[in-house]
Amino acid sequence: FSGIWRVEYEELGRFIDESCAFGLKPRLTYFDDDSILIVEMPSAVHEAPLVALHTALTCFFASIPYDRQAINVNVLSNIEASDSLVPDMRISLQNMYAEDADVIIPGLAETAFSQHRDALVDKLEDAIIENPSLLLVIAAVVCEDAPYRSPKRGSDTGRALLQDPMKRRAKDFVSATGRPALNAPVVVEGHTWCSISSVWFKVWVRGDHPIDIFSDDNTLVADGFLYPQDTMAPVLAMMEKGVNMIRERLISLCKEIDPDVDVKALQDSNSVFRVQREEIVTKIAGAMRETAYRRYSAWFK
């Protein structure tokens, strides 16, 4: 939406936060310079690319030793990273012994599903401007074979589905679609409810200066496809590099709180961050069915 003033964006945000009428709450992103508001409804496929990453990060931080009373480490979804950005995932560090300490945001991730990459880049660029100390930024773009359109009620698909006296249960709806897979579109009654053409990742890490979203320095940025081909190796390596930088920032925070702290165990190279490509594939393939069923449910109403 264009021509939206900040006061209108803030009022809409308050209304959504306070309203009991919303089941699934939309996520808002506002661009001050252009007075543009992006409204996104949550979907399983939108969230899926980062689910495995969220799990891997949570396990990694749980495995390394630091004073958990002194430092609060969080990996959270859909929590503000700036006044105008609520990313899909945010990593934060918080000094619990200082009354006036800011929450440190060393990493964030954002997914685009059926959304132009330019809008995603604009979001990330604004986030870096507002958080120049960011150490790790991850983008995932999931593209459908074609923009989704619900079936017309007078079509063959519409007539077949509307013969049902009530909405089909999820397992009945997808029972004839075969095993979940990225290369298996969810087609029911001749209509494609969800079909993925590609899944692409890009990862940036900080050098001596704030992250440059347009950099082509292969020591600081990597990109690759999860699907249809697999070129994820440099992406996964850059993720690991970024997480290790966040670990170093955590060590630095430990020393700020207690200059005499022993951080040898925290520096142990045997504690490594790993995310499996296969797990990301599984999450997205499973989410295709959920997204298809939610689309059908919304249409059947």
Image: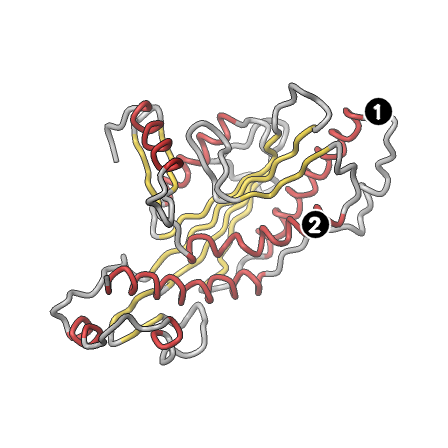
- Does 205 sit left or right of 171 as displayed? right
Q: What residue does disc 1 label?
A: 259
- Does 174 sit left or right of 165 as displayed? right
- From this view, report whether residue 12 is shown above or below residue 226: above
Q: Helix or strand or loop: what does disc 2 sit on?
A: helix
Query: Where is residue 217 shown, x and y percent of the image?
Result: 56, 39
Crowding near pointer 2: few (<14 within 10 Å), some, many (20+)? some
In percent of the image, x 36 and y 33: which residue is there?
13
Q: Residue furthest front?
A: 20
Q: Residue furthest top?
A: 100
Kind of residue sitting beneath label 1:
Pro
Q: Is residue 137 visible?
A: no
- Does 198 sit left or right of 255 as displayed? left
Query: Where is residue 76 shown, x and y percent of the image?
Result: 56, 43
Kind of residue sitting beneath label 2:
Phe
Q: Which mark is residue 216?
A: none
- From this view, report whether residue 182 is shown above or below residue 262: below
- Does 220 sit left or right of 64 as displayed? left
The quarter in which the C terminus is drawn is bottom left
Query: Where is residue 268 shown, x and y percent of the image?
Result: 82, 46
Query: Where is residue 177 shown, x and y percent of the image?
Result: 37, 77
Q: Which mark is residue 60?
A: 2
- Sequence-wise, the earlier of marks 1 and 2 is 2
